[in-house]
Image (cartoon, rainbow, N blue to C red):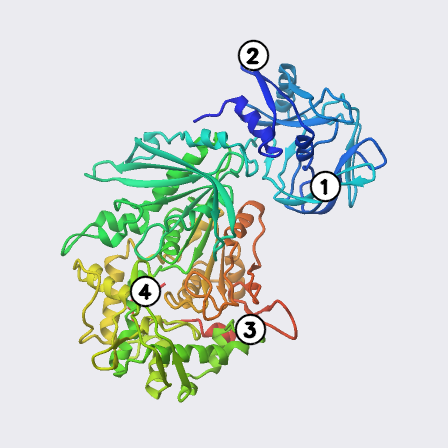
Amino acid sequence: MKFALSHALLLVLAAADCALGLTRTEKVLSDGVVEVTYANFTAADMERVGRRGGSPRDLAARTYGPPASYPESTRTEFKDARTCWNYWWYSASCVLQCKLGQHCIACLKPLSVPATYTGGGSIAITHGDLQKFAKDFAKGEYEFPVSVMTEGPATMDWYGPSDRRFWLKQWFAVTEASVRSCTGGKCGDWMAIKSWMPCSNKDCFKYTINDGYAQSTLQDICNAALPADNSFPGITINSSSVSTAITYNASIAESDWNRAATINYCNVTFAYSHNGIADDVVHVSYWVPAPCAFRNRYLSTGGGGFAVNSGPRRVPVGIMNGAVSGITDGGFGSYATQWNSVFLLANGTINWQSVYMFGYQAHHELALIGKQLAANLYNVSANKTVYSYYMGCSEGGREGWSQLQRFADQFDGAVIGAPAIRYGQQQVNHLTSNVIEQTLGYYPPTCELAAIVNLTIAACDGLDGQTDGVVARSDLCKLNFNVSSTVGKAYSCAATTPRVMGGISIGASSPAQNGTITAKGAEVAATILEGLYDSDGKFVYLSYQPGASFSDAATTYDNATGSWKLYINGLGGEWVARYLELRNTSSLTSLSNYTYDTLRDLMIEGQTRYGDSLQTTQPDLRGLRSAGAKVILVHGEQDDSIPAGSSVHYYESVRSVMYANMTYNASVAAMDDFYRLFLVPGGAHCGTNPLQPNGQWPQTTLETVIKWVESKAAPETLDTKGTINSICRWPLRPLWSGNATTPDCVYDQASIDTWMYDFDAYSTPLY
């Protein structure tokens, strides 16, 4: 769908407040130029439009409009402004942005009202205005005929005869600011505003205006223009499958990944098929913002468990950040259908199309289609950038790496959380705790393991220099804490029910429990934390950090015998039964005869079978670096599903492969140019840890990577709302001193060494 020039003009004037109460007339002239007149400005319109102005940098407090010494003049004052902006207004003039071809222009014309404005005036953009500007624009000439333009350390004033034109060279956009209107020495109340983003020179027109635009504009966007069928070789888009649905004032609850917000969006869904594959249908859904909220961005969001999407949980974050935001069903039948439902064609027969769609192809196609859809919907010219981003955690994190490793120029930025990248090892590793219990012949009551975790947290909390209920230095905990010190400590727990992850039940119901920690219980916990070794003493796979819960080790209570028994982890059990043994079942019924060597062999089997699809550990990211992409990886340090060490090991693999000839510090500095890893103190799997609630998750990481990509503002730390309000980037580690409210990020070689792994059980490197 292509917007007419007149629509573009309406959008831009609406940029002033995204919903002005104006009337407009237009006339298309013989050469295609549109002459537009806006009328019926009200005093309220004028006041709202006046809340714009600025210079291309962050501002603390500035004043715009005629100087205060002009008693009849009106000016607008700003404070607490974030980001840069440039939009002009004062009491006798109105600014419009006009689209000519793919150019961005700004025209200032006098209102037909006196300087002491009372409403009811009009403004016209004439044929001659557009012709003159087009000529000047083509020559790269910009006129500034306003009589005086000055800038000082605290104010920027502009003023001049109201019968002069003022041509703007560049536009910027307020992200947030407080404003008030002043006449002479009297000022109104401060009011909060929000606005949009950059637009400059010949290469600039963007539909980048503010939230709250008239609902009819969202309706227009909902009449979606699909990409052409021949845009993507090998697939055909079914244009008859398109459906759209508008939602206004959707309330989005705060989560670990986003702030609370109220959003408007249109959900555009359609289907496509792969040429030559019978009965192949893939559904995609794109939430699209109104033109006034679009900021030239596209966002893909990932799934979790065996799901290729997270439904509506992550998509709103795209709308909040001015992006078209997409999900895919992977071709599995519906957005709620998970991969395990379609993996087998029959017992023993793999549906390889589903493997590759889940592995990487579905998200590749989602992004390709979504980026072009965004460009079509908002009429973004070919020489303009639609910034593309990815956000996902767990399986969604693996999906993100599957794109970054294979399609280096697909995303400009990505937020990767706790990725399940080492699929062959990761899924089998969920059974390691079970096999340890079976090998040691002891199945701890769930409360006993919980008590060991709580005592570990209490013992290691203060090692980071601050006592706040958070183990921010699990490496120091490894070096200084012995699980055996918990033996004999009392525990007491209420009855519990299973938790669910990725649609799979983990754990079992348990009765109320009272007792003391046993030597056997401590031995099980310590053996789990050491990681998996085979019978030759070779290291097979890593484990969780101290302070993480032992969820994989959950046992089940046998009411008949009054004892605790083995409970086979659902994630690990299904992986072995369905994906390695190729049986259409979601569980293993027994681990009889399973040894540590059995687990090693199963890990190697999975790595071999799915090495080109699910094993997502390519360490050579030179293409990604060359493409200029930026990656922020966040991983909860006490993740009890995917160990934090998994992400550290991949980071170190990339560093050592790409920068083998550099010193450690030099190679880390080189990595910082495009890839930064942040371990979230106390963080659990993809979110805040209920056992360490003061270790809050970095909620605005997507905004952080956007700033890195679009404003070149690389993050030194990540912010949270917890007592640990600043997260250090790897390999620096947090350490508090005195009464400091934020930690020092320190280099500690002994601590770093605890995160280094030598997987000598394999004949080839395990990245």
Image quadrant in which the N terminus is located:
top left
Residue placed under numbered mark 4 in the picture:
426
1 and 2 marks in contact (CB < 8 Å): no
Q: Is residue 478 visible?
A: no
Q: Name the residue under label 1.
A: 180
Left or right: residue 338 versus residue 55 is left
Q: Which amino acid does label 1 sit on?
A: Arg
* Disc 4 versus disc 2: nearer the observer: 2
According to the image, label 3 marks what residue? 468
Q: Is residue 589 visible?
A: yes
Q: Distance between the residues labelled 4 and 3?
A: 31 Å
Where residue 29 is drawn, which disc sits there?
A: 2
- Percent coordinates x, y for residue 707 in the rendering: 56, 48
Q: Which of marks 2 and 3 is in front?
A: 3
First reached walking from the N terminus: tag 4 or tag 2? 2
Instruction: Say whether residue 465 is left or right of residue 645.
Output: right
Q: Nearer the viewer, mark 1 or mark 3?
A: 1
Name which of mark 1 and mark 2 comes first in the sequence.
Answer: 2
| Dot placed on the residue nearer the N-terminal end, 4 or 3 | 4
